[in-house]
Image: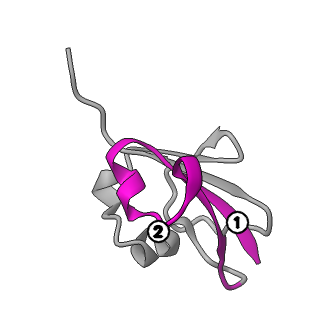
Amino acid sequence: MKIELRLFANLRKQLPLGSPRGRCELEVPDGTTIGEVLARLTIPQASAHLILVNGDHDRDFDRTLRDGDVLSVFPPVAGG
């Protein structure tokens, strides 16, 4: 199945080379979870502060993704 992955800020460096504008399409096996996608790209779960699936907030790393899902991942934000 195919999903769209969008990474933001410093997480973008984990995308495959040549990925435009912080996003890429990934081919993953049926039943793949959010946590498995992060592990595949060597993104520690602690670095995935805000996770959206199809625009809805989701922090369940065991959530199974579906064909066509858009997974967006934001790192922790600091500043003042």
Percent x, y of residue 24: 61, 61
Percent x, y of residue 10: 32, 47
**Dividing the image into 4 quarters, which one contains the N terminus?**
bottom right
Q: Which of the 4 image quadrants contains residue 39?
A: bottom left
Residue at coordinates 37% horizontally, 52% vertically from top-left? 11
Residue positioned most to the bottom: 29
Tell me the number on the disc at residue 3: 1
Residue at coordinates 31% horizontally, 53% vertically from top-left? 47
Q: Which amino acid type corresponds to the residue marked 2 in the rendered image?
A: Leu
Residue at coordinates 49% horizontally, 75% vertically from top-left? 36
- Left or right, 57 with reference to 8: right
Which of these two is toward me, 79 or 62?
79
- Whole-Å distance between the Cαs marked 2 and 1? 17 Å
Element class at badge 2 = loop
Q: Residues within 10 Å of mark 1 (few under 14, many from 20)?
A: some
- Left or right, 10 with reference to 61: left
Q: Which amino acid type corresponds to the residue marked 1 in the rendered image?
A: Ile
Percent x, y of residue 67: 79, 69
Start and end of the magenta stretch?
A: 1-29
Asked if residue 66 is positioned above or below residue 52 in the image, the reply reads below
Tell me the number on the disc at residue 54: none
Tell me the number on the disc at residue 17: 2
The mark that comes first in sequence, 2 or 1, is: 1
